[in-house]
Image: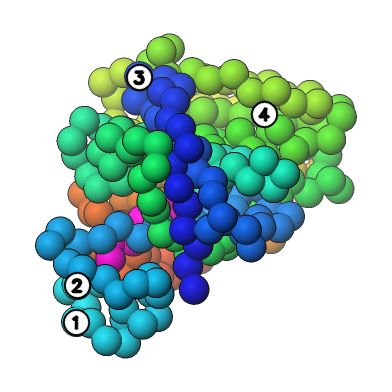
């Protein structure tokens, strides 16, 4: 059974990012576990389709044609407060483009949202000498959660790409964090992050890497980090959250093949 969250409130935290806070009894059994990159699969109903109640995605998939299944969008949990039973999810909004962003921009208290999860695989390794976290707006919620989770004195370099200075956000941490905001302006998405990582003077010691965002950016940085910087594969959490020119349905259907092809290309050097 999926979880069902009720919108408690929304907050525009930058001109292009809105936070939706979910709560209610439908989150009574929700828990995120130890991962700072915990994510949920949001289930958006198709226009004109009525779903059986209580909503059960398993029943929907067994009894309804695929074209009527809800559209799925994957989002990082920005914060989960089990005592208050509040789930924060931050959405990048590009006007009326897309599905999840416009929904979040219009969300009002009382609206319901079904979702599956959580999943997740990364949290900052306490044994690392330093951490490299880099990504675009789509990765910021996971990066911010990781920065907040750093123990006192843990060293981290954070390279965060956003459109401009109005998109910067504050984050509290006990760690020793160098946070660099990269303003994209008119440059291609991902280019500022690629350039900044390429120019970075890597500190000595064992690194733990978190790089997520647009798939082409991630492809370029995966090769750079492994081949040029010599970072072992098991010291990196690196994956494309999205890909220019593809919605999530198209990206998820091709992601495994894309990653395998990238791995083969980079293994060949």
Alpha-carbon neighbours of circle 2 within 10 Å: few (<14), some, or many (≥20)? some
Circle nearer the viewer, 4 or 1: 1
How far is disc 4 from disc 3 in space, using C-alphas? 25 Å
Observer-nearest of 257 and 88: 88
Quarter of the image for residue 189 reads top left
Name the residue tied to disc 4: 157
The magenta span reads: 70-75
Alpha-carbon neighbours of circle 3 within 10 Å: few (<14), some, or many (≥20)? few
- Please determine whether, in this image, residue 80 is positioned above or below residue 72: above
How far is disc 3 from disc 1 in space, using C-alphas? 38 Å
Mark 2: which secondary structure? helix
Q: Which mark is residue 65?
A: 1
Mark 4: which secondary structure? strand
Observer-nearest of 196 and 266: 196
Q: Residue furthest bottom?
A: 62
- Please determine whether, in this image, residue 118 is positioned above or below residue 230: below
Q: Earlier in the sequence, mark 4 or mark 3?
A: 3
Q: Is residue 63 magenta?
A: no
Circle nearer the viewer, 2 or 4: 2
How far is disc 4 from disc 1 in space, using C-alphas? 47 Å
The residue at 59%/18% (across/down) is: 170
Q: Earlier in the sequence, mark 3 or mark 1?
A: 3
Observer-nearest of 111 and 191: 111
Name the residue tied to disc 2: 68
Residue 146: x %, y % from top left: 67, 39
Residue 106: x %, y % from top left: 28, 35
Residue 42: x %, y % from top left: 40, 57
Whether residues under marks 1 and 2 lie with C-beta atoms below 8 angstroms apart, the answer is yes
Q: Which mark is residue 136?
A: none
Task: Report the label total.
Answer: 4
Whether residues under marks 3 and 2 lie with C-beta atoms below 8 angstroms apart, the answer is no
């Amino acid at each position: 059974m999926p979880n069902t969250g009720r919108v408690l409130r929304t907050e525009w935290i930058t001109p292009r990012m809105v936070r939706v806070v979910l709560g209610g009894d439908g989150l009574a059994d929700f828990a995120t576990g130890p991962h700072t990159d915990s994510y949920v699969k949001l289930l958006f109903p198709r226009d004109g389709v009525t779903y059986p109640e209580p909503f059960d995605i398993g029943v929907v998939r067994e009894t309804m044609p695929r074209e009527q299944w809800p559209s799925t969008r994957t989002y990082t949990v920005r914060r989960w407060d089990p005592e208050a039973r509040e789930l924060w999810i931050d959405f990048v909004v590009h006007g009326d483009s897309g599905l999840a962003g416009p929904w979040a921009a219009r969300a009002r208290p009382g609206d319901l949202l079904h979702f599956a999860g959580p999943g997740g695989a990364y949290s900052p390794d306490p044994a690392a000498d330093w951490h490299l976290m880099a990504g675009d707006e789509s990765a910021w919620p996971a990066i911010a959660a990781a920065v907040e989770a750093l123990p006192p004195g843990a060293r981290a370099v954070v390279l965060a790409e956003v459109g401009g200075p109005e998109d910067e956000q504050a984050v509290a941490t006990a760690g020793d964090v160098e946070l660099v905001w990269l303003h994209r302006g008119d440059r291609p998405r991902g280019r500022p992050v690629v350039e900044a990582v390429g120019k970075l003077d890597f500190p000595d010691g064992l690194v733990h890497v978190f790089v997520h965002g647009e798939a082409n950016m991630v492809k370029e940085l995966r090769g750079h980090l492994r081949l040029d910087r010599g970072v072992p594969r098991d010291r990196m959490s690196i994956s494309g959250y999205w890909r220019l020119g593809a919605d999530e349905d198209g990206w998820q259907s091709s992601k495994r093949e894309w990653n395998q092809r990238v791995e083969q290309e980079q293994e060949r050097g």
